[in-house]
Image (spheres, helix red, strand yellow):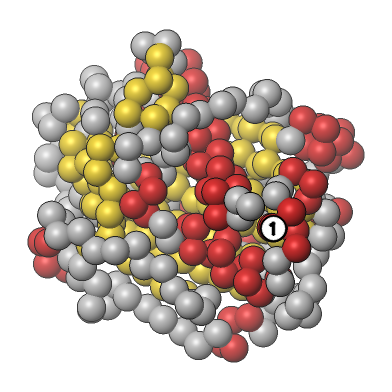
């Protein structure tokens, strides 16, 4: 029987983490430089990475009518009664995976099957997932009173506000202090043009399938570039972040090869409020030697991810 961790909500200042610094606890882990990596020229915004589909092509797959939302019970049908009670009373569930990433806390949505399959096929050997529920009364009245389509577009554009990650702080368990995580964060046109910041890719209409590239400078791992994929089915939406460049601790020791780190956020509006699912996982070496430290590090970061998103909602709907 799996064990689910219940932790109190943690307060994070500024914003929260989405990519490459999730492995501060692995400075001693090294991956062979012989591991294959993709050339930067393979990735540009105006080539095959960018994908846009018509709205009608995906939204019609939702089991719920266009202007309705699932109930909390429908989204949480996979949880036990005790887990549901804990989620509603405490507001969050956490589960750490020390040897193989899994998606035990992934809600039942039209996006779930493909996300679970993709993370499973990646053979990630360590990770954590978190599920948070915020009832409608937690949000500002402007959020609750907004027309559903307008609110949905804002929730989607928050996921696209990449620049808001710049300057974020997170809690470092090893140092017992708050530290800056991302010194730089912006969208880019290609890996070769990572110093040329593009505006946040805010849109006027939801795009069911879209991919962008981002650059981030991490305090521990330096400059990194990632692919960010957005998916929307009905009222549910997700963001998937995958590193396109190797992660090196202090620029020297390779700890994660290209494509071996994933971060996911899934936003599920329900009639009673909002579910936010976050997952962070990687394929790296020497996990067992750092297991206790890794669990603390991953836990802090997944809390930061979801708190970043919820804080941005309050900012956007501030009265």
Q: Secondary structure at mark 1?
A: helix
Please indicate whether residue 255 sits to the left or right of residue 161 in the image: left
The residue under the point 76% across, 77% down is: 67
Nearer the observer, 30 or 205: 205
* x then y, percent, for residue 217: 22, 41
Asked if 239 appears above or below 57 in the picture, the reply is above
**Image height check: is 70 above or below 176?**
below
| 109 or 143: nearer the viewer | 143
Q: Residue 302 placed where, x, y %?
A: 51, 36
Q: Residue at x 25, y 37 (%)?
A: 183
The residue drawn where x is 68% and y is 23% is 8
Q: How many marks?
A: 1
Residue 23: quarter of image: top left
Looking at the image, which residue sits at the far right? Answer: 81
Residue 120 seen in render: no
Residue 309, image x, y percentages? 54, 47
Closer to the camera in the image, 2 or 242: 242
Residue at mark 1: 142
Quadrant where the N terminus is found in the figure: top right
> Is 53 left or right of 108, judged from the image as shown?
left
| Residue 32 visible at all | yes
- For mark 1, does the 10 Å Cα neighbourhood hold few (<14), some (14 to 19), or many (20 or more) residues? some
User: Measuring 57% from the left and 61% from the top, which residue is drawn there?
Assistant: 155
Q: Which x, y percent locates residue 253? A: 16, 29
């Amino acid at each position: 029987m799996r064990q689910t961790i219940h932790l109190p909500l943690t307060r994070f200042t500024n914003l929260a983490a989405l990519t490459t610094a999730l492995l501060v606890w692995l400075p001693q882990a090294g991956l062979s430089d012989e591991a294959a990596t993709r050339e930067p020229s393979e990735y540009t915004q105006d080539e095959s990475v960018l994908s846009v589909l018509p709205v009608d092509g995906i939204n019609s797959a939702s089991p719920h009518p266009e202007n309705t939302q699932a109930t909390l019970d429908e989204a949480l049908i996979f949880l036990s009664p005790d887990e549901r009670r804990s989620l509603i009373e405490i507001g969050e569930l956490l589960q750490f995976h020390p040897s193989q990433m899994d998606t035990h806390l992934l809600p039942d949505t039209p996006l779930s099957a493909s996300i679970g399959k993709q993370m499973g096929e990646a053979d990630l050997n360590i990770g954590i997932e978190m599920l948070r529920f915020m009832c409608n009364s937690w949000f500002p009245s402007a959020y609750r009173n907004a027309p559903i389509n307008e609110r949905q577009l804002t929730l989607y554009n928050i996921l696209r506000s990449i620049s808001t990650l710049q300057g974020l702080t997170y809690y470092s368990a090893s140092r017992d202090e708050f530290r800056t995580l991302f010194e730089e964060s912006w969208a880019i046109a290609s890996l070769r043009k990572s110093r040329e910041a593009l505006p946040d890719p805010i849109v006027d209409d939801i795009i069911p399938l879209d991919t962008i590239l981002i650059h981030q400078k991490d305090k521990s791992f330096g400059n990194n570039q990632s692919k960010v994929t957005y998916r929307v089915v009905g009222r549910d939406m997700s963001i998937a972040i995958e590193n396109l460049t190797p992660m090196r601790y202090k620029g020297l020791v390779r700890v994660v090869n290209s494509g071996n780190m994933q971060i996911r956020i899934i936003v599920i509006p329900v009639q009673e409020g909002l579910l936010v699912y976050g997952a962070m996982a990687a394929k790296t070496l020497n996990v067992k030697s750092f297991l206790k430290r890794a669990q603390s590090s991953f836990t802090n970061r997944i809390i930061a991810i979801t708190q970043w998103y919820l804080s941005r909602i309050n900012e956007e709907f501030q009265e």
